[in-house]
Amino acid sequence: MTTKAFGARVARVEDERFLRGRGRYLDDLAADALHVALHRSPHAHARITDIDVEAVLDVDGVVAVYTYEDLTGAMADPLPLLIPHPDLTHGRTQYALAKDQVNYVGEAIAMVVAVDRYVAEDAAARIVVSYEFLPPVVGLDAARAADHLVHDDVPGNLAATSTQATGDAMAAISRAPHRLALDLDIERSACTPLEGRGTVAKWDTDNGRLEVWSSTQTSTGVRAAVAAKLGLDLSVVDVITPDVGGGFGVKVVHPWPEEVLVPMAAMALGRPVKFTEDRREHFISAAHERAQQQHVEVGFDDDGRILGLDVEIWHDNGAYIPYGLIVPIITTTQLLGPYKPPVYKATFHSLYTNTVIVTPYRGAGRPQGVYAMERTMDAIAAALGKDRAEVRAANFIQPDEFPYDQGLIFQDGKPLIYDSGDFPQMLDKVKALVGWDEFAAFRDEMRAEGRRVGIGLACYVEGTGVGPYEGGHIQVETTGKVKVSTGLTTQGQGHQTVFAQIVADELGVRFEDVEVVTGDTRRMPYAVGTYASRAAVMSGSAIALTARSVRRKALELAAEALEANVDDLEIRDGVVEVRGAPGAQISLGTLAVLSNPLRYAFDEASKAATQFSVGDPDKVPVPEGTSPGLESRDFYSPPRSTFASGMHAVIVETDPDTAEIRILKYAVVHDCGRLINPMIVEGQIHGGVAQGVGGALYERMVYDEHGQLLNASFMDFLMPYVTEVPETIDVDHLETPSPLNPLGIKGAGEAGVIPSAAVFASAIEDAEGIVITRMPISPSELYDLRRTHAGSDEAAVAAVEGDS
Amino acid sequence: MTTPPQVSAPDALHAVSLIVNGTAYALEIPARRLLSDALRHDLGLTGTHVGCEHGVCGACTILVDGQPMRSCLLLAVSMDGAELTTVEGLTEEGDRLGPVQQAFQDCHGLQCGFCTPGFLTTITAGLRDDPDPTPEAAREMIAGNLCRCTGYQNIVKSVLRAAELQRGGGDA
């Protein structure tokens, strides 16, 4: 090959269509479809005593209306609990349409199908539902108190209690020379992609097939769910993920009620049907995340080295728990970050509330875990009067200790074993990048001007590239074009570009000749999905292995055609050449022709492959163990996750009067193994940091005591504009290759957002000299904290005990 | 229980003529049809995206007689005779990418692409008014549009790059 694509800042092939307005997002499809509108519960907790749809039928343009009574077979059962776990003793999921009780504002009760969305909404508003009200359980305090229950048959509102331990943590803590206890709190936020959820379905009567398009992070998951719910054979259901306007986790949940209701209606009505979620619906009927209360007990020595760590977490899982315990499992396991407490115990309680369900949001429980751990590190440093970076360094796993077994079971059911990393070097890099050692002088300078600044640091380790597997299919066409498909989906990550980079290098073809398709079950029916920073690791590796298979096939065919030894061949720009024999060459396109013995010639190229012109007359045309076509389908299945890592540092300025918080400097050092495309990785980090700024300083879901979400709009839910994000984000990379996959790569998608709550809490605490225990934090909350703190010399929560 | 709203007879249709990206269209649409819906669903110009339908995210921004406006907050019937430019109309002679589009490609100014059309139209108008913005002015120019993917870093760069391209500094 002439230029190496892997590792280069290759411009994205996706951009062309997006920049011209030619992307095809869900609502751009099926212009002839009927539209649905959902009648959703306005109450957080109530029994349904009657549903009157009579008035709907008077609306011109209404085609159908569905309530629970219209659901049959598996559609009448609750939606699946996707990820069961032995500790999830009280798993509850909702019905596609509420059966006899609603448990959050926004829960779907009825679906209207009409000629357009306007008419569908008119009609849905005319449905009259009678309720018997139940007391709503809102927030973790109410859930823990359990004076009222979300589900009658779930005592204590407890979906699960789960503990993992590497020993007797409390005993180790009690023996330690120093001890601390912290109570921490983190609030709800949400993914809020710019495009909401959406599904289109068409029943193809002529072919007896169901075609579904969904704005999802898992085509194959939706396919299996739709087939199971509608009683169809998997083989007659196709699910295609079009361009997706952002996911960040929420679109991995499946099936959403609408994802099975829309295909059901399309089959029943024999017409294409479309659901396009609006913004308010996304706030009240998709998913949220983050809310936890945490209690940390830690024992440590004079150097700040942790001797025992015990953590108890109360996790708000919302009204139902379709995605299982993934989020709190990740919190309690990834909490450990780059550190190695000799004894660790973590218990979480997953609790129901009458609010929107909680499922993974970029970071998926890690931001909370990192918050707990890093708040603890800062508290230890404060207690000992030590430098915060030094205390962290004293607890690092060292580079020669990999693979490092944390002794826990990770979210994928596999041991939590870190594969590689270099935390001391990373710390040096981030300190240099942010100016850690020069900060004291800078602070003095600012103080002299009457300004108040603080610096924060937070470290994390992120399990990425979780299994079970992904696949790749590559076919070289007779034109020499290389068609690649993988089953997982894309929501803006640039998979078409990075996977083409991999294929270009592995196969020896021009980048421009590679075309990648993702998330189409017709092209690749075996796949899992895009979540957990797994796409590059999983599909990237699968595609690399597939490209190597195709390369082997091509070389074997070429060796025969050129009468050369395979070892003497190389492929450059799609042409196989014999090394040292100029002119002895054959293109991959021609090899594709030769690979498929023909009876009929369709064009000049195919004449070369007909039975009178190709092959040894003494051999069968397709020998045993081979197959026609220059193509392959291969899979990658890792032994366990690969662990990326990073450290963020931020300098903030807090206004002495208004308590406004301004970001002066933001530094990121990031290690995701070998970089396929640094431009794309940096873009992912930028986006994650911005989302983290939102989560730390602005975004929260404000529920009132009745379970009404008060800020269910972009007017009131404060997503950062450009004015809220740092003017620059300084990024430095470290590349410690993963030994677990053929490319040495680790995931990068979620990294940017993981340490945000922790790093801002650290910096604001440093600026203010007030212990920060609740995030996010607004200027008015900081202002209140100042007033509470004034007159009290004690830190709010972290009380040092047992100093000898 | 609330009383269901009264439903009037099917919406009366109104004749509206729009000039979109230089092409004249005659539409018969109900009075309540949003301009964003008319563009997307009546004219099939799906490049204009709808992110919030309450005027905050800016994804649906188009140019109305040259001014950036949120098409989700406008009724199509109120646009009779207006000249509209959508993302589909930002390309140049020979279907080449316009300078703002090209700058976004050069600077990796987009990821999922959903908010992008609103940024492209907003910046097109912004650079007409301020062809040589400072970095601060570039940030101000895009301060009314939401992006959830990029963290805005490369969008600011794209604004500056687009200005450079418009001035003829193509190969920088």
Image (cartoon, rainbow, N blue to C red):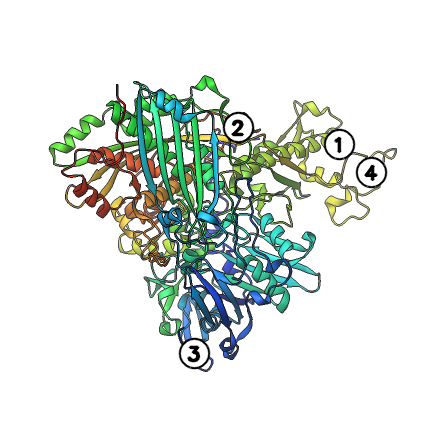
The residue identified by callout 3 is B15
From the image, state whether disc 3 or disc 2 is nearer to you. Answer: 2
Residue A435's place in the image compared with A123, above or below, is above
Residue A436, visible in the rendered structure: no
Q: Indicate the quadrant containing the C terminus of chain A: top left, top right, bottom left or bottom right.
A: top left
The residue identified by callout 4 is A621
Circle 4 — which element?
A: loop
Residue A566's place in the image compared with A706, above or below, is above
Q: Position of residue B41 (x, y in %)?
A: 48, 67
From the image, state whether disc 1 or disc 4 is nearer to you. Answer: 4
Q: Position of residue A311 (x, y in %)?
A: 39, 33
Q: Which one is in front, B33 or A776? A: A776
Q: CA distance from mark 1 to mark 4?
A: 14 Å
Q: Which one is in front, B164 or A642? A: A642
Chain for mark 3?
Answer: B
From the image, state whether disc 2 or disc 1 is nearer to you. Answer: 2
* Badge 3 amino acid: Ala
From the image, state whether disc 2 or disc 4 is nearer to you. Answer: 2
Circle 3 — which element?
A: strand
The residue identified by callout 1 is A561
Q: Position of residue A11 (x, y in %)?
A: 46, 41
Residue B113's tag is: none
Chain for mark 2?
Answer: A
* Badge 2 amino acid: Gly
The residue identified by callout 2 is A744
Q: CA distance from mark 3 to mark 4?
A: 67 Å
Q: Please, which residue is most extreme toward the right here? A: A618
